[in-house]
Amino acid sequence: MTQRESAHYWQSPKLPGVDLLRARYIRKIFARHTHETYVIAAITEGVEAFHHGGSVHQVGPGGLALINPDTMHTGHAGAPEGWSYEVLYPDASLVARIAAETTTLRGTPGFTAPTAHDPVSARHVQAIHRALEEGNALAADTLMHAVVARLLRLHGGPLPERSVRTAGARYALQARAVLEERMADPPSLESLATELGTSPFALLRAFRQLYGMPPHAWLTDARVHRARALLDAGLPPAETATAVGFTDQAHLTRHFGRIIGVPPGAYRRGRARTYKNAWPPAS
């Protein structure tokens, strides 16, 4: 029997500040992207592989992929059968509160390595999913605090501040601000470099060094993040696509799926209602 890819991205009102994903992927390839949240992904079957920090990492059952906010990474199968996982996306404010209550970390808390073999924490992640499916808010919230505290204690530390001292870094920051402001009609690389008073190659190099990807890839990622916010606000996918600078809804759908893991319509449905004991295919 041929196995199908399936994914369900959702949010429960019983655990605010956390998005969830349960998925089975076989041929799925995530483009270079970032998350505004933390990523805590418990692999349940197969092997996931992903680029992070200049290396390719692999993680299997009993292991976790741990990604900090605004950190470039990818995702693809590390074995022919693909991988299944259950993922938590806690927002930064929630992780900061738990860190302040349970650790002595100073500064911005984060994960010091992108993978960890930690079956206990992996089971906690899965238990949070089960608790929310059953409507057990107390158990889900308790487990969420426990797993974040445990992961920060065992695999965490303060995140280094991103340096902006060099002229190149300042150009990259200015370029990002321009692209955010003119997302729907961005300038070309040459026009952007001229506007900032530098050369295209110097700007490209500086942008890669600061953000881990070239400006055009960063812009696609930023468009998807803004599209999520517009979809959350109730804007239809077709209007959302135009608002963030994609040519049409199909263009939005293609990039949204390569970064979020599900199409915009499935994302809207998962964010608009509580989990109803179903795991529909990613279509």
Image (cartoon, helix red, strand yellow):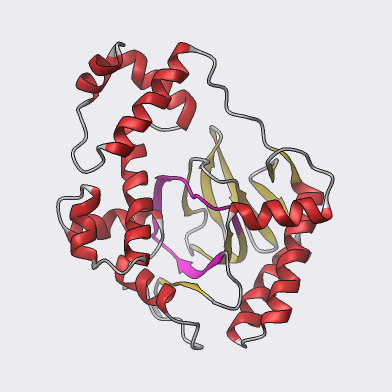
Determine the residue positioned at 37% across, 77% down: 269
The kind of secondary structure the magenta stretch mainly shows is strand
The residue lying toward the viewer, choosing from 12 and 29, is 12
Q: Which residues are magenta?
A: 18-40
Q: Could you say which quadrant of the image residue 151 lies in?
A: bottom right
Residue 175 in the magenta stretch? The answer is no
Whether residue 3 is visible to the viewer of this picture, yes or no, is no
| Residue 161 pos. (x, y %) | 63, 29
Which residue appears at 45% of the width and 65% of the height?
Answer: 25
Closer to the camera, 99 or 31? 99
Q: Position of residue 191 (x, y in %)?
A: 20, 21
Residue 7: give x, y in percent of width and height.
43, 71
* Residue at 39% across, 59% down: 28
For the residue pair 50 and 237, the one nearer the viewer reads as 237
**Is residue 37 covered in magenta?**
yes
Q: Is residue 173 above or below residue 168?
A: below
Picture quarter with the C terminus? bottom left
* Number of on-image labels: 0
The quadrant of the picture occupied by the N terminus is: bottom left
Q: Is residue 213 left or right of residue 61?
A: left
Residue 251 quadrant: bottom left
